[in-house]
Amino acid sequence: MSATDESGAASGTTPQHALPGLLVLGGGGHGRVVAEAAFLSGRFSRLLVVDPQAAAGWSFPICPCVADETGIAAEPADWRFIAAVGDPALRRRLFEAYLHKGFAPASVLHPAAIVSPSAQVGRGVVVCAGAVVATLARLGDGVIVNHAAVVEHDGEVGAFAHLAPGAVLAGGASLGDGSFLGSNASIRHGMRVGPGVVIGNGAAVVADLPEPGTYGGTPARPLNKTTRPRESK
């Protein structure tokens, strides 16, 4: 799917009443970022955060929060959803659960992001303000491209992977399914990082990293195969 095809008609071409609502699954910091980006995009008629833990003390001016969607009689035909949590395994579970309920996923592209019209953007993707997704880049389902991160030309990001703020995937490089590229970390041109890899903040990947594990430093080297850096929720 191209960057111009996601989530229905583009803002400004469809009457507000014809646009779908958006269920934002997750009320943590990342969920609020996604809700705000969705609001600014103008592609949704209404927004609702769904989070049983956040609902009771919710205070956020963009939209309300409920424990689950059953209380508002959300019909799948009228709403889209996006899994808005940092943890890749939980993000995948939420994505699959709402697909099973019959809801269609939407991607949220902040209006201050730059997404090439030739890029391929999967379902349920978030591209935050200041991020760049360049020519012929490919983003799998459930990907997060956080603030000021860059996916350069011909880069590939696997399903449910996450580029943290300021991370750079150079041209022709790839980041595997469920992997995490930390803040201000980089992957050299053409390098391949496999699935289930965690790359710490500021690290520089200058060789292929096919094995799951946690890597850090310059050049990136194995640190601890079981420890995942803290991610936004």
Image (spheres, rainbow, N blue to C red):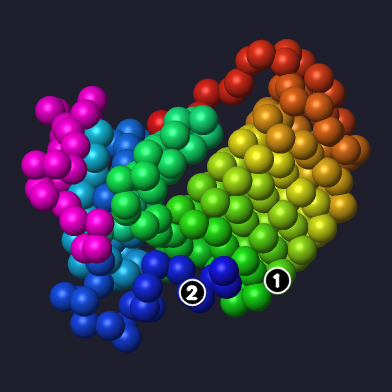
- In the rendered image, the quadrant that contains the N terminus is bottom right
In the image, which is nearer the foreground, mark 1 or mark 2? 2
Tags 1 and 2 touching, CB below 8 Å: no
Crowding near the residue tagged with mark 1, few <14, some 14–19, many ≥20 C-alpha atoms within 10 Å: some
Tell me: 149 left or right of 90.
right
Image quadrant assignment for residue 30: top left
Which residue is at a point 63% across and 15% down the rendered structure image? 227
132 or 212, nearer to the observer:
212
In this rendering, does residue 226 appear at all?
yes
Dot 2 amino acid type:
Asp
* 53 falls in the magenta region: yes
Quarter of the picture containing the C terminus is: top left
* Residue that protrudes farthest toward the bottom in the picture: 13
Q: Measured along the vertical axis of the image, is residue 57 above or below residue 107?
A: above
Counting from the top left corner in percent of width and height, residue 212 is at: 75, 25
Q: Tag count in the figure?
A: 2
- Which residue is under mark 1? 135
Q: Residue at x 87, y 52 (%)?
A: 190
Query: Which amino acid lies under the numbered mark 1 shown in the image of this protein?
Result: Thr
User: Label for residue 5?
Assistant: 2
Secondary structure under tag 2 reads loop
* Label 1 element class: loop
Where in the figure is residue 171, as x and y percent of width and height?
Answer: 80, 59
Q: Which of the marked residues, 1 or 2, is nearer the chain's N terminus? A: 2
- The part of the chain drawn in magenta is 52-78
Queried whether the magenta region covers residue 116, the answer comes back as no
Q: Which quadrant of the view contains residue 38?
A: bottom left
